[in-house]
Amino acid sequence: MTLETLTGATGATGAVELDWYGCDLRTGQIVEDLRSLTPSGPLSRRLGAATSTNFDLGIAGAGQDWVAATDPGRSLLVAVDRLIDQPVWAGMVLTRDAGSSWTASLGATTPEAYLDRRYTGDVTQVQQDQAAVLTTLMAAPLSQGPPFVMDAPSTGVLMDYTALDGDDRTVLSALQEVMGQEGGPEWTVDVAWSDAAHSGFVLPVRVRPAIGVQVADPGAVFDFPGCISTYTLVESYENGKGATAVVARGEGEGAARLSSGSQIATSLEEAGWPRYVHRYTPASGLTDPTQLTAHAVKALGLMQTGSRVWTVEAVASQSPRLGRDWGIGDSIRVAVDASPRHPGGAEIVARAWAWQLDAGADRIVPILIEED
């Protein structure tokens, strides 16, 4: 079951209590119930990117097979929300420090990071569905990798894509490159139970035109005053965040360097905006002018009016439940009755592009981006 299919009433649901499991990274099978595992910071996820968290493990209460269950490079930590029996976070263990202390320190990163350790090889896709292209790019990680499973129905949009093994392009960079093009599909790596017996987990690689559910009237509502303790609206037109003209450049030098045409927000400039120019190289090894133009068009769409990011810190036990009421990519409503920034109140709908969860502090932080 994906987060797109989960439904339920929103509102106060009780404290978020997480059950932790140490699993075999290749198979996803549970090795040990890690009852003494505690994150030393918030858990987090981000759309199409990896995030990391550190952990403390009390060895005395860790279980007989804790060493195998936390072996760097071979183990996967999974957090399950006890109330809704839903896996909400997974991370590969990459570091472990343990010795004379009764506490072991672990470092883990979400499975997207594994995709930066595998390479695309030679890939040529001509007028293939976007989902098929991403599935082809995932061929290496699907072989002798973690328990990835593709959840990539056809998007109905055809595209061309070429990568050469000599470009040393990682799967992660290729997936991010495709996602960064105009009309490019979004992707994320979820975690789910592998079977009805709950003996282990799989890592669905979800590909959609847009991850999550976007609606004008979402059921997940964060209110202030209410479940929100504090919030910040960050508005920026800094370099790299705002521009009225964008050029995407390929690799190379001088006249041999390919680029997109300049994509200009004509309507804004005609309305009186000064011109702000942003030039960038979207991905290593990218030289196709058509792909460069697709990147420039999407970047202009995101940057022309600058960025508006809401960071909402809320009480988790009083908020819409992560994993049941909302998930990454979903629309969320923020309702502000009154605040110094919004004395007359405000009500917006924005997408959850990332989140942080600190269950011990009863704190949930959706990172919301307003989209035009």
Image (cartoon, rainbow, N blue to C red):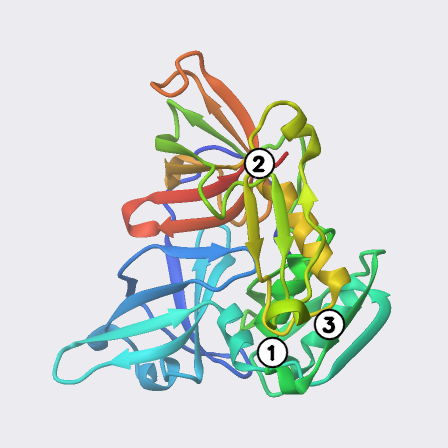
Residue type at tag 1: Arg
Label 2 vs 3, first from the N-terminus: 3
**Badge 2: few (under 14), some or many (20 or more) residues near its Cα, within 10 Å?**
some
CA separation in Å, label 1 and label 2: 34 Å
Residue bearing mark 3: 135
Instruction: Name the image quarter holding the N terminus.
Output: bottom right
Residue type at tag 3: Thr
Label 1 vs 2, first from the N-terminus: 1
Q: Is residue 358 left or right of residue 335?
A: left
Could you say which disc has been placed on residue 169 in the image? 1
**Badge 1: few (under 14), some or many (20 or more) residues near its Cα, within 10 Å?**
many
CA separation in Å, label 2 and label 3: 39 Å
Residue 313 on image: x %, y %: 36, 38
Along the viewing direction, whichever of 21 and 227 lies nearer the viewer: 227
Label 1 vs 3, first from the N-terminus: 3
Residue 228 on image: x %, y %: 38, 31
Picture residue at 39% right of the left edge, 76% below the top:
93
Picture residue at 34% right of the left edge, 43% below the top:
363
Label 1's element?
loop
Picture residue at 66% right of the left edge, 86% below the top:
165
Residue type at tag 2: Arg
Q: State which quadrant residue 168 falls in.
A: bottom right
Q: State which quadrant residue 227 falls in.
A: top left
Q: Are marks 2 and 3 in contact (CB under 8 Å)?
A: no
Could you say which disc has been placed on residue 275 in the image? 2
